[in-house]
Image (tube, rainbow, N blue to C red):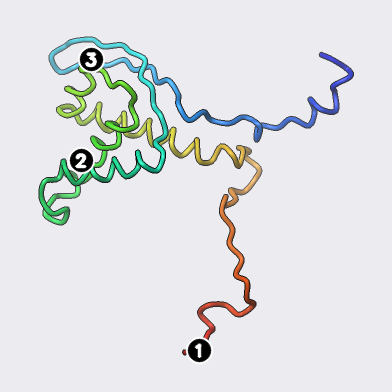
Amino acid sequence: MDLRNLPTEAGKTDTEVLIPREISLTINYKSPSNEQFSEVLRSRIPDGDGRMQIDRRIAILAGVPWSQLSEYAQARITALAMISVYLVDMPEWVNTWAQEDDELLFTLREEVERHNLAWFRSAMGSSENTETVSRVSISPSHSAPINAVKQ
């Protein structure tokens, strides 16, 4: 401990800890054919183009109008599109088994979604005693509320 830096060190809070855009996920998986896989995957939060790429892949995977698919099929397709963009350099075994094994697919989707939520919320910090505050605030330039304007 450096006594000269006590005020600085005491002022540190967990709001200074940011979640990186790219993280490592260690996965252990036993396939239905009894093969064991253990690997470190990289999850990267997509930028705007990456988010659009997820949407395009959803449309390609669907192949039919979205409303013609069951909710379960929609969830699977969305999960497949998400992990295909979030997971950097996806190994072949993940590519194969995620399409066949829904437990693997939805577990991977849950982890990349958890990373996504943590990354976007990390700028707000984390504390059990503080209320979640929006990162976006808009104030109109006029004083009258929009819904009070007469037409």
Q: Which residue is mark 2?
A: 77
As shown in the figure, which amino acid type bears the numbered disc 1? Answer: Lys
As displayed, is residue 100 above or below residue 30?
A: below
**What separation in Å lies between label 3 and label 1 (alpha carbons)?**
64 Å
Q: Decide: few, some or many residues near mark 2? Use Cα within 10 Å; few <14, some 14-19, many ≥20.
A: some
Residue name at image x 19 percent, y 17 percent: 31
Q: Secondary structure at mark 1?
A: loop
Q: Secondary structure at mark 3?
A: strand
**What separation in Å lies between label 3 and label 2 (alpha carbons)?**
23 Å
Q: Answer with left or right where residue 149 lies relative to residue 16.
A: left
Please state the horizontal and vertical placement of residue 54, each as a whole percent of the image: 29, 41
Q: Which residue is mark 3?
A: 30
Q: How many marks?
A: 3
Quarter that holds the N terminus: top right
48 or 26, nearer to the observer: 48
Q: Decide: few, some or many residues near mark 3? Use Cα within 10 Å; few <14, some 14-19, many ≥20.
A: few
Please state the horizontal and vertical placement of residue 76, each as a whole percent of the image: 21, 39
**What separation in Å lies between label 1 and label 2 (alpha carbons)?**
45 Å
Residue name at image x 85 percent, y 23 percent: 6
Pointer 1 or 2: first along the chain: 2
Q: Secondary structure at mark 2?
A: helix
134 or 55, nearer to the observer: 55
Picture quadrant of residue 14: top right
Q: Which residue is mark 1?
A: 150
Picture quadrant of residue 60: top left
